[in-house]
Image (cartoon, grey):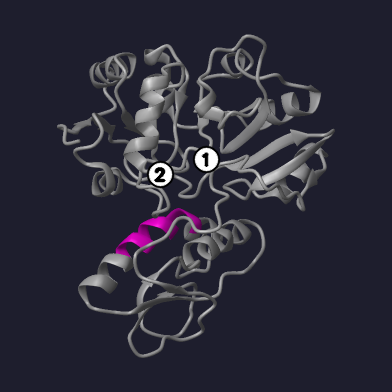
């Protein structure tokens, strides 16, 4: 597949053009506050299948549906009182809820990997909310990259992976948060954490008083971003490195001593580190390849708040195989 990938602006004219691409079964990458998504009409099975093919995504890995409002979400999933509270508190925002399908909803089964649940969220990005409104349909929106590789937080990252494979990219600049949404599901009377994300779980529990089970494990892939190996650069990673070794490129955090070719946050700010994480992994990987480093060493990241999410992504990115 080799098609002309258009770079579009957030103008009304370009968003309307992008919406027509979606309505005709095409693929458009769009910005969110977390990462860039790869959008397709969630009701169009052929378009959804193209998303899996373009990304090289396993068919067992479900997709998150993006809608412009709570009322639209309520047309495709069933809310109980607790999930209603969470949605009203955090939407638009970086929280994905996996809930039972609404009665008679006509979403293709491949979106949910043949389960009776759907993942849904309302993104906190004004450009994309306008775009979804122009489309008139909910959008599937996995990260706009090759499956398993580093997530895209800038339109150039999308083009690095998918140029010539998708119809268009809406240029919304750099993503605000830089890591994906937090994913919760309501299962057997309890909320369960399926993926750490931009909203720390302890913040959700403190704000809402809703208890979240952090120990839930399933043999099935219920959520995107839960594969053991994911978010991976081509160069191997060594984590919790206090100094670099010969042949290693070093990624620092805070005032870590060493060959600071890159630094996630010189001030030691976890929010800044999360925003920079995927972009720096991409840049470090390119530098390592071009300069023939054999390893990227990553400084220790505090394992609290957003640090838990950052360490989750780094752990998955460092997995061999």
Q: Is residue 87 visible?
A: yes
CA–CA distance in space, label 1 to label 2: 24 Å
**Relative to 236, residue 189 above or below:** above
Q: Disc 2 designates what residue?
A: 175
The residue lying at 54 percent from left, 23 percent from top is 109
Q: Position of residue 3 (x, y in %)?
A: 16, 32
Which of the pair 173/73 is nearer the observer?
A: 73
User: Magenta region: which residues?
Assistant: 274-283
Query: Mark 1 falls on what kind of element?
Result: loop
**Crowding at mark 2 (Cα within 10 Å: few <14, some 14-19, many 20+):** many
Q: Is residue 127 visible?
A: no
In the displayed image of the protein, which residue is found farthest to the bottom?
Answer: 246
Quadrant where the N terminus sits is top left
Residue 276 belongs to magenta span: yes
Residue 182 belongs to magenta span: no
Side of 120 relative to 208 (left or right): left
Marks 1 and 2: which is nearer the front?
Answer: 1
Q: Disc 1 designates what residue?
A: 61
């Amino acid at each position: 597949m080799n098609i002309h990938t258009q770079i579009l602006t957030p103008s009304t004219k370009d968003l309307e053009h992008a919406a027509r691409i979606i309505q005709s079964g095409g693929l458009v990458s769009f910005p969110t506050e977390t990462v860039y998504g790869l959008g397709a009409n969630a009701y169009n099975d052929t378009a959804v299948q193209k998303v899996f093919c373009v990304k090289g995504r396993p068919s067992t890995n479900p997709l998150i549906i993006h809608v412009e409002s709570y009322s639209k979400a309520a047309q495709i999933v069933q809310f109980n009182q607790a999930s209603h509270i969470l949605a009203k508190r955090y939407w638009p925002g970086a929280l994905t809820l996996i809930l039972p399908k609404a009665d008679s909803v006509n979403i293709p089964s491949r979106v949910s990997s043949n389960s009776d649940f759907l993942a849904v969220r309302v993104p906190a990005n004004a450009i994309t909310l306008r775009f979804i409104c122009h489309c008139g349909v909910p959008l599937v929106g996995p990260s706009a990259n090759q499956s398993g590789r580093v997530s895209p937080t800038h339109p150039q990252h999308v083009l690095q992976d998918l140029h010539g494979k998708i119809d268009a990219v809406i240029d919304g600049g750099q993503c605000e948060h830089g890591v994906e949404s937090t994913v919760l599901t309501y299962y057997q009377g309890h909320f369960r954490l399926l993926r750490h994300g931009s909203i720390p779980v302890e913040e959700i529990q403190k704000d809402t008083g809703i208890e979240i089970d952090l120990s839930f494990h399933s043999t099935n892939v219920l959520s995107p971003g839960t594969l053991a190996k994911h978010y991976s650069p081509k160069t191997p990673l060594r984590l919790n490195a206090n100094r670099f070794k010969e042949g290693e490129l070093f990624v620092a955090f805070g005032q870590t001593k060493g060959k600071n070719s890159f630094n996630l946050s010189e001030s030691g700010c976890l929010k800044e580190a999360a925003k920079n994480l995927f972009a720096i992994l991409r840049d470090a990987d390119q530098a390592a390849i071009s300069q023939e480093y054999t390893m990227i060493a990553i400084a220790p990241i505090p394992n609290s708040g957003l640090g838990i999410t950052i360490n989750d992504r780094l752990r998955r990115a460092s997995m061999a195989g």
